[in-house]
Amino acid sequence: MGSLFRSEEMTLAQLFLQSEAAYACVSELGELGLVQFRDLNPDVNAFQRKFVNEVRRCDEMERKLRFLEKEIKKAGIPIVDTGENPDAPPPREMIDLEATFEKLENEMKEVNTNQEALKRNFLELTELKHILRKTQSFFEEMQDPALAEESHSLLLGDEERGGQPMRLGFVAGVINRERLPMFERMLWRACRGNVFLRQTEIETPLEDPVTGDQVHKCVFIIFFQGDQLKSRVKKICEGFRATLYPCPETPAERREMAIGVMTRIEDLQTVLNQTQDHRHRVLVSAAKNIRVWFIKARKIKAIYHTLNLFNLDVTQKCLIAECWCPVADLERIQLALRRGTEHSGSSVPSILNRMTTKQSPPTYHKTNKFTSAFQALVDSYGVASYSEVNPGPFTIITFPFLFAVMFGDAGHGLIMALFGLWMVWREKQLMNQRKDDGTWSIFFGGRYIILLMGCFSIYTGFIYNDFFSKSLNIFGSSWHMANISDEDIKNNEMLELDPNVTAIYTPGSPYPFGLDPIWNMAENKITFLNSFKMKMSVTLGVIQMTFGICLSLSNYRFFKDPVSMFSVFIPQLLFLMCIFGYMVFIVFFKWIVYDASISYKAPSLLITMINMFLFKFPDSQDDYMYSGQKGFQIFLVLMAVACVPCMLFIKPFFEWRAHKSGKRTVRFGTVQMQVNGATEDTAVIMDQDEGEMPPRPPRGCQATRKRRSLI
């Protein structure tokens, strides 16, 4: 039974694994991929299972690896993926992996912290450099000697004047460019115009030490008078997150500070470069192994997650598991258990026993690289029940062909076929690359589907005579214009080609393959092609639906279900044939009977079907397509209507009747019996059918029911 057309024959097996060999055995079974384990602890909380600590350790390792992967991608370092698929490491290696990941994480966090602090200092020094340079230019802009002398006296104070010295204070800082307009308005309104603001933009964007983004900033200097305005200005700068820096008042002091700032910037740049080089070396080293580390961590986690599904025996030395596995692969599973036992060094072999159960097994279809994409396409709509017919093999042909019927362009189909052929030709190299792009993974996984869709599209494109939306004149048109003169062509904008005229169209000599290219020039091209494609689509759709219903007959026969065969399959097939099958019959009948000479008499297909359901028929016998059409159509409609209640009520009625006459299972607890004064517990009475009395205790015995539960 096990084949691509039906599910593999599955069996329920019980495993007995020694505690020291369980990890290695589950690892070998996981590499084999033929076993589905059942949870034997459904009522146990996930945090109360035996290997929950190991699962948490694996989660922590994955978190550290994701942190390293994020840093590697942030640094723009390519991650090396050789396509290697290592086996799950032994449990003792898990400690080494944890130590390695812990060391790398701590080192990266320390490097990031130091680098962020260095970048913050570098940013502050860079902003201070621009402030010293820009403020110097602000003061040098005062070219008027009288204005310069007055500014100098205002800044330094003029004690020689009769009153108290007048002195202007100023603050300088840096602010984000997008906050500057609002900053100016707030200063003007809060200080009532008693401050003087000068600002200029820094030409080179600065790097944010936290996010790494490029930020545009502006240098400003604010002149004010009095401590009250100074306090108000500083509060406004703090509210707008402007950074204030000390700026000397004299040019000499500013020049001396600028020299010191430049020296510190050069030293800091050297330290930053060394830190960046060290960080890059660490990340490059991690990028070479991070894919392998991810695989190992996930395999370890999967093994311990699977071990949490097992039960411990009474001695606490053996793990008991139940699993579904294919019958044809039991020998391979036995070999995998033997390998796991040998790798673990256990002297006690693992045991696999087949179990008898009435539970429905899971569905398992063996696939390869060609059929896996088609099977995944079918499974996305629904997985077939166990032993049902698998529609996957039929989808290999029907899906690409029906796509081509809708697509139908030889040029575009050629591009699609070449793209699919390229992926198939280089599948080994492309598979080793394993790009993280989800879209690419979808395309590469469906490479054989794309190849077949392209090939079928080329075929249907030649049938439609469509190559990049243009017609090809390969064999020459079958229409002739022998009786049409050049004068007729000049005097008439449109000419009608009548297929009844032998000089225009020779009967029995159609275009060899596909549509005649002359239809590309016809005014009624769209009308003709739409009618042709619609009728062809309806025909193919009815064939596909009929084939699907016939597949259900195979299921009913396999499961020996005569009720479904007579109450579902036959009514469905009759309903489909009476309506849609008859419509396909009319399409071919019109193509065969109504040739070009009497095509004007052919009735409309749509009107014929509507009148069929409304029981409206023509009065004249000449308007019928064939004799007996009226009675035959009435019979088909009545047959289709009669099939509806058969599909809706017959099978539910039999199921209701079987359910009503079915037997409910009653389960009793332990029965305590007293025999000749001695008390003993009898066996539990299981699966007692309703309507049957439980066995009576022996005469002279007094039976008392201890507990009773109904299921």
Image: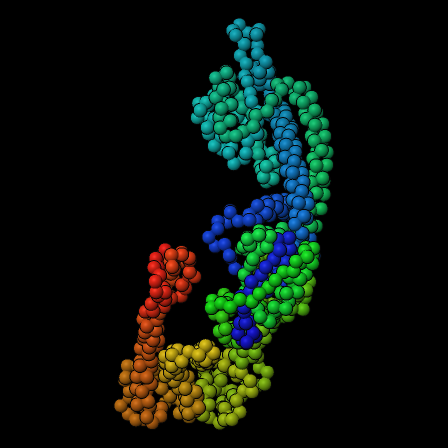
Residue farthest front in this picture? 676
State how many labels appear: 0
Quadrant occupied by the C terminus: bottom left
What residue lies at 49% left-to-right and 83% top-to-bottom?
A: 490
What residue lies at 57% left-to-right and 82% top-to-bottom?
A: 473
Instruction: Judge from the rendering whether residue 377 lies leftward or rightward of residue 30; answer left or right.
Output: left
> Looking at the picture, how far across and down is residue 436, in whole percent?
61, 55
What residue lies at 65% left-to-right and 47% top-to-bottom?
A: 94
Q: Is residue 538 above or below residue 129?
A: below
132, 389: nearer the viewer? 389
> Looking at the picture, how far across and down is residue 682, in whole percent?
42, 60
Quadrant occupied by the N terminus: bottom right
What residue lies at 72% left-to-right and 40% top-to-bottom?
A: 277
Quadrant housing residue 27: bottom right
Quadrant housing residue 368: bottom right
Q: Is residue 669 visible to the viewer in this orientation of the structure?
A: no
Q: Is residue 76 above or below residue 381?
A: above
Instruction: Judge from the rendering whether residue 264 lies leftward or rightward of residue 12; answer left or right.
Output: right
301, 440: nearer the viewer? 301
> Looking at the picture, how far across and down is residue 411, in whole percent?
58, 73
Q: Is residue 651 above or below residue 706?
A: below
> Looking at the picture, how far across and down is residue 183, in whole percent?
49, 30
Q: What colouring style does the render use? A: rainbow
Quadrant housing residue 71: top right
Instruction: Judge from the rendering whether residue 651 lies leftward or rightward of residue 435; answer left or right.
Output: left
Q: Is residue 29 visible to the viewer in this orientation of the structure?
A: yes
